[in-house]
Image (spheres, helix red, strand yellow):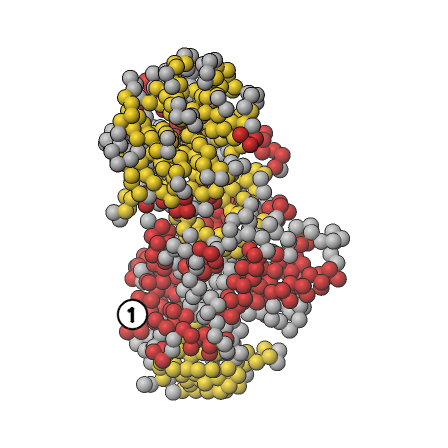
Amino acid sequence: MNFLDPILDLFRGKAVTIPPMDGALRPNTALDDGEVIAAALAPDNLAVLRGLPIYSSHREIRRLGHDHAILETCPADVSALAVEEDGTLAVALDDGSLRIGGTRVEGFNGVTALAFHGGKLYVANGSEHFRPSQWVSDLMHRKASGSLWEVDVKTGQRRKLASGLAYANGVAVDAANNRLLVSESWRHRICAVPLDGGGVTEVLGRLPAYPGRIVAGTGGYVLALFAPLNRLVEFVLQEAQYRADMMREIDSRYWIAPTLSPPENFLEPLQNGGVRSMGVHKPWSPTRSYGLVAMLDQNVRPLSSFHSRANGRFHGVTSAITVDGAILAASKGGNHVLRVLIGGGDA
Amino acid sequence: MPSVIEMRKITKSYRGVPAVKDVDFTLHTGEVHALLGENGAGKSTLTKIMAGVVEAGSGEMLHNGHKVAFANPHAALQNGIAMVFQETSLVPSMTVAQNIYLGEEKFLNRLRGIYIAAQQFLQSLNFSVDPTALVASLGAAKRQMVEIARAVHHKADVIIFDEPTATLTPEEKRHFFALMRRLKASGVSIVFITHALEEALAHADRISILRDGELIETGPAADFDRNKVVRAMVGRALTGEIYSRRREATDLRKRGRLILSVRDVSMGSMVRNNSFSIFEGQITGVFGLVGSGRTETFKVVSGIYKRDFLRGGEIEFDGRPVRYNVPVHAVEDGIVYVTEDRKLEGFFETMSIAENFYAGPLAAGLTKSGVVSFAEMREIAADWSKRLDVKAINDNARVVELSGGNQQKVVIGKGLAQHPKLVIFDEPTRGVDVGAIAEIHRFINQLADEGLAVVVISSYLPEVMNLSDRILVCRQGRVVEEISPVEATEEKIMFAAVH
């Protein structure tokens, strides 16, 4: 009778399901147990500049050290950062501008991630319609207008490598396989695109959260997943009319949508299920925000993960890198930068 | 102390094989007397003689100093001796209230009156059972409660409980032991058969231990500890083998390939958006209270129940989406479910061990010739009897004649003869003695070591904690938490299961 299922699915609807967080993604409290190394407003875009970690906080680019010195203040919020081996800094802003060193590159709308390799800068452009700070709107409009670009560092010439991506939100170079790895947030997967352009192939799918930035790390990659999949949100995403009404009538802060931080205002939708029971906030309750960093091997298979669960503080991790055998994670929703030993996650 | 029951030199044989031999047993007035022993040790036979279910071959029994020999359970009940059976003796087509008042019907029976009286009576025992519900619609735990209520209702001065707590939740067990204390305080003498040694040590006044039909030891409970009880029961120390291992991270098996992925599976109100994965080469322990949907979830996985037609979720087995309408398709794909209710669903009790073993591959179409072959049946039976160490006269013995532990081994063997990739054990050691528990645990571990994906559903926390490489906790129809056995404590698991 199994042969009937595809036909029956036409009538009963194909199941929309959320993969469980288990196996290498088994929940733990590694992020909450990690060392807080900086308190900053909306920290993001971790990178290493001349041996020292840097991060962005709204419009500022800061050094992660004793003084948290401001290296640069930009005219708009920083949406992506990358550092070339020679110390050249590529900075993308929320207004759509992109600068490599002192050279401006035009033509982008919402750069979400950058990666240098072999004299080229690879650019993930999240959406043609919305700024990076408006990522929730892009999700709610169910757009798939993301693209991947190659920019020549010397000439500033750009070339499109892939398009039609459902929010390209992270890019890393897999030099050994001559390809780029791209996080496609709204399709909950990591894809591969050949360095010289071509078809998009899925290398890691069915993620239980929205993947964000991906960077090369110790023996593989580090992936920041900035918000969890949630059944209520998935349901809302299927209901076009409801979504249209919600977006028209309700302030975007209060939409039923993923978020980087737990709700603080009573007007915000409840973390469904995230209720207290006997005075304890249930860590396993389904939430709209979560903290998750995954270590991937060279074949982009999950090895271990670091979590801040429903009752945790460090949600909305948008960027993570490895430095000296530890992971630095920027919890944009939790306003802290954390340091977690790589062995501290769950294998 | 005056004794209410005194048994002297009791012997009973079945087909020449003695079930109890020259047993002396004394039950004092107002005491809780735990009767312990492995399956087949003779506990049930001894108590059945006491309750008039079977007749003793030789020896004598005194009740309040008078020599008695009950011809049937009704005669025993008339004399104030009631027995609560391990296999419930309720009438499934009647309501709870009708079962409690069975045999006391008046000429003009008024159902409403019976329901009100039963409601009050059940409430006084703290049992939440609907008196108007049909017994057939009740789960094992609630049937047990009705059985206990019936015995208490008959105002017996001797009540024999045969494994009363095996199907009860921790909360229900607390109520049961409070009830037992109340009965004891009112002068009722209680014989209490259990496999949970902690219960016997905690709640009994005296303990008697049987082995191979003989009384090995009897004395005040305070003189016993777990090791002493186990040594007397099996003739060797077993405690080191089960339930005492402290799990270290290095003890745990690494997960292998993902074999089963369950995503947002729903089935009525019992299974709700349940999601989890099962990996090869690991034992995944599943804990949950009665009604948490753990058994139902795995029955959906193995095709016994169907998930919801609309928005029923997805199940992927071995990389392929599946939706089984009947179990045989699941068996063909390599999923075997070893049932928790072995008597009802596990085996054909009047068929031989060999026929039961052969039924597995025969049903799944895995026999060599595709038709019944007695040579193949003998071969399969000999192989699995040896591997599982089934203790029987020969493979032609009927399963109904075996002890609980050996029956369970037959159920396991019948499933494993189907060459599964995923084995789901539902309460594999319920109603099984400690000796057989150790053997079954060893066998389950061996399966995981061989690379099979193994799921063990259990209500017994020490079993889950000692056997599992990962623990899933179910509540209200879904897996709510995954806990590593390294960090697991009973409190932590119970909190996830309850709140």
Comparing B204 with A125, the one in front is A125
Q: Residue at x 62, y 37 (%)?
A: A1
Comparing B331 with A10, the one in front is B331
The amino acid beneath tag 1 is: Arg
Position in image of residue B75 (x %, y %): 45, 76
Label 1: element kind: helix
Q: Is residue A147 above or below residue A45?
A: above
Q: Residues within 10 Å of mark 1 (few under 14, many from 20)?
A: few
Q: Quadrant of residue A30?
A: top left
Apparent side of residue B94 relative to residue A134 in the rendered image (left or right): right
Comparing B225 with B15, the one in front is B225
Q: Quadrant of residue B97?
A: bottom left
Position in image of residue A163 (x %, y %): 50, 19
Q: Residue at x 60, y 63 (%)?
A: B410
Q: Residue at x 59, y 55 (%)?
A: B450
Name the residue tied to disc 1: B182
The chain letter under disc 1 is B
Q: Is residue B163 above or below residue B414?
A: below
- Residue B402: in sight, yes or no? yes
Comparing B100 with A297, the one in front is A297
Q: Residue at x 51, y 60 (%)?
A: B428
